[in-house]
Amino acid sequence: MSNAYPEIYLVRHGETEWSLSGRHTGRTDIPLTAKGEEAARAVADRLKGLTFQAIWSSPSQRAFDTCRLAGFGERAVKKPDLQEWDYGAYEGVTTTEILSKRPGWQLFRDGCPQGETAADVGARADTIIAELRAVAGNVLIFSSSHFLRVFAARWVGLPPEGGEHFVLDTASLSILGYEHDLTEPIIRRWNQK
């Protein structure tokens, strides 16, 4: 979609063993599966012909490998603020397992013991958004699901907890942008495979 205003392209990393099994993967650095690598390579075709003023990636292996396999690794800058939610005591644990010990728990409302809250993740997202607004042109970002969900919420002015309303599949592509001018941030496309 051609637009006079900058667009922010978001790519969630490809499949990992933990994303496949539903385990919370924050700071544990695990590789892509073979299927995840294949999906990462396919991202290149979906971005063919587009130009980016900047390419940023989470420093996680899964995000940066997705970036590299999509053909953007040489230009990418790793940004620590793009890291996935720090799940603390819930790292490597599934939601079902958490709920068996803590009924009613919700990540976006309750956060994680010894980890981050939605507000913590939102503050990192706000830092990235401020940096984006200084870039004159399209930006490509590779990161993880829960961070990108909070990021999208903050982009359109929702509280960080608003990220609970957005779902992202592995190796999906989303586009943020503006409607009438730079004061009207919008979500142009979401969770495209």
Image: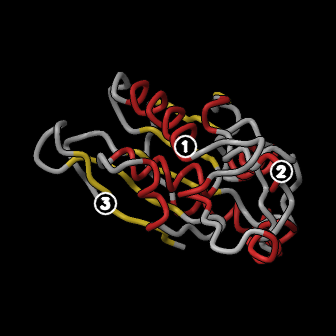
Question: Where residue 23 sits in the image (x, y, percent)?
Answer: 81, 66
Q: Nearer the viewer, residue 68 or 98?
A: 98
The residues tagged by marks 3 and 2 sit, at their Cα atoms, a distance apart of: 35 Å
Q: Do the residues labelled 3 and 2 touch (CB within 8 Å)?
A: no
The quarter of the picture where the N terminus appears is bottom left
Question: Where residue 74 sits in the image (x, y, percent)?
Answer: 70, 32
**In which image quadrant can residue 27 be found?**
top right
Q: Which of marks 3 and 2 is in front?
A: 2
- Identify residue for label 2: 89
Q: What element carries label 2?
A: helix
Q: Residue at x 39, y 38 (%)?
A: 138
Q: Which label's residue is closer to the chain start, 3 or 2?
A: 2
Classed neighbour count for the residue bearing mark 1: other residues with Cα under 10 Å, few (<14), some (14–19), many (≥20): many
Which amino acid type is shown beneath numbered disc 3?
A: Arg
The image shows residue 44, relative to residue 184, as above or below, that is below
Which amino acid type is shown beneath numbered disc 2?
A: Ala
The residues tagged by marks 2 and 1 sit, at their Cα atoms, a distance apart of: 27 Å
- Identify residue for label 3: 188
Q: Which label's residue is closer to the chain start, 2 or 1?
A: 2
Q: Which label's residue is closer to the chain start, 1 or 3?
A: 1
- Identify residue for label 1: 141
Question: Where residue 168 sits in the image (x, y, percent)?
Answer: 56, 67
Q: Which of marks 2 and 1 is in front?
A: 2
